[in-house]
Amino acid sequence: MQNIQSYKLLQTLALLTFIALVTFLPSVQFMPKWIIWFNDRQRLLELLLLSFVLLDAMVIGLTHSTKQAHITYKIRNVFLALIGLAIVSCSLAQSPRYALIETSVFAGLCYLALFVARLLNEEKQVFFKQLTYALWASILLYMLSFYTGYITATVFKTPLHWPFPFTGFTNIRSFNQYQLWGLGLICLPLLMNNLKNNVRIWLLIALTCWWVLLFYSASRGVLLAWLVAMLATALVYQKHAWPFLQQQLIQITTGFLGYALLFKAIPAMLQYNLVTGTVMRETSNDRIGLWSQAITLIREFPIFGAGPMHFAWHNQSNAHPHNSVLQLAAEFGLPAALIVLTIVVYGLNCWFKKFNTNTVKNHSKLDGQLAIILFFTITMNAAYSMVDGVIVTPISQVLMFTVIGLMIGHYTYDRTSNIIDANVKSKIRPILAGLVLLAMIWSTLPEVVKGLSGNEKGFSMGYTAAGPRFWRETK
């Protein structure tokens, strides 16, 4: 009984931390004022969330039998090889402790994905309802903050210096990542037939207002990633994807019209310049230079990379190359990057075997549309990760592995296995979770103690680039 209570307690603590991180932290200030940077606040809660998840994995793996997603020996061995390469890369890095931070956090995020998959397997409909409510609560709170700033500026005719009134993120591109991960999932209720008409109308209005923020954020990479995902989803799922794709087309249209009204037409009528910066802006970050430097690092350190999280040690201004594949290859090495890409290809191959144009029609409406939305979401963010730090920022990391966990859980929902206490082989997962937790605590503790003590440089790690990468770096 005590073991069951411990398992439930850790699960509840992890869920509450997840809600605090994703739902409240972008728009509600509830952390000490001396933690100035939004990135650092989100990182602290991410570490707390991963700690609870890893403790949960230890308890549930060693003392409690429950439904978990089955991992084949081949996949397990591939992951162990990846961990081995990462450990060698850490040991060869300029700062092994800093490299271990990145490695342990990514390992913890993998356990988060398995945690999400387990929750889905235990009670699918309830879990999705909770997740949808959390995402919608987050969106409504954020829009309340944004549109309060907009209305105040309009009434008092105070120019908004773009990206204001965006808050809650150290960089506006971090907001784009946060927005993209939930852009498909929040449409799921609209694709069901059990919504009241008045609720449906309010959700459509809220979605339009949410898309206004996407256009105002002035990210061409977001729109390009959205277009890639739309085309890929239409190609893979054809007519079965049309209800969702139609919804997306309606929302992008009404969102753009809303943006034109609020940020172009109304300021023109009031005869004052409300904002600066648009989605058609002429300036752009020098991605080509960052990618070239990543390729240089790959040439210099082809096997084990420059070290996890070590791009920041070789660049004066940017802590990552704004490209997920180049980042993995430059920091972890080409073999590790190849393994990750192989896992992705293998995972998609398994996904298409279960969810394709011939099989998706045989699933329930919820399961069929969910499969389409999850594919759309992972494709869109994979495309966006080619031009931005999707795999770097804390909320994006948490949402990324949440979506991966949803895909694992959705795929394995009817093929889960009971992990029996007497099975010695099942002990590998909880033991590894304990080792990851110890590594994460040891590697992050110095900066956590320094930052929480009110040090004027905050949680800064002191590398060359201004960041953010893990913590917000200050000069």
Image (cartoon, rainbow, N blue to C red):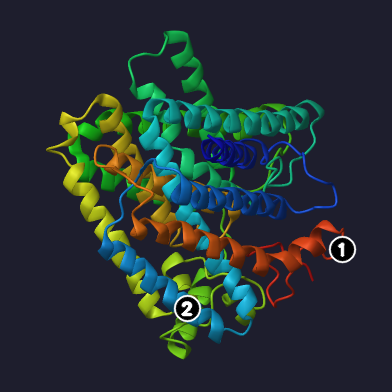
Looking at the rendered image, the disc whose residue lies closer to the viewer, 1 or 2, is 1
> What residue is pinned by disc 1?
455
Residue lying at 31% horizontally and 60% vertically, measured from the top left: 344
Residue 388 seen from this side? no
Q: Residue at label 2?
A: 330
Would you say 409 lies left or right of 330 here? left
Give percent across and percent down for residue 407: 34, 44
First reached walking from the N terminus: tag 1 or tag 2: 2
Q: Position of residue 110 (x, y in %)?
A: 45, 56
Q: Image point 37% across, 66% down: which residue?
A: 79
Q: Please tell me whether residue 321 is drawn above or below residue 94 in the rendered image.
A: above
* Type of amino acid under label 1: Asn
Residue nearer the viewer, 249 or 451: 451
Q: Quadrant of residue 429?
A: bottom left
- Tell me which amino acid carries mark 2: Ala
Q: Nearer the viewer, residue 127 or 8?
A: 8
Residue drawn at x 39%, y 75% as measured from the top left: 336
Classed neighbour count for the residue bearing mark 2: other residues with Cα under 10 Å, few (<14), some (14–19), many (≥20): many
Name the residue nearer the viewer: 440 or 273. Answer: 440
Q: Which mark is residue 349?
A: none
Quadrant that contains the C terminus: bottom right
Whether residues under marks 1 and 2 lie with C-beta atoms below 8 angstroms apart, the answer is no
Q: Secondary structure at mark 1?
A: loop
Q: Is residue 41 left or right of residue 379?
A: right
Q: How many marks?
A: 2
Q: Is 277 located above or below residue 128 in the figure?
A: below
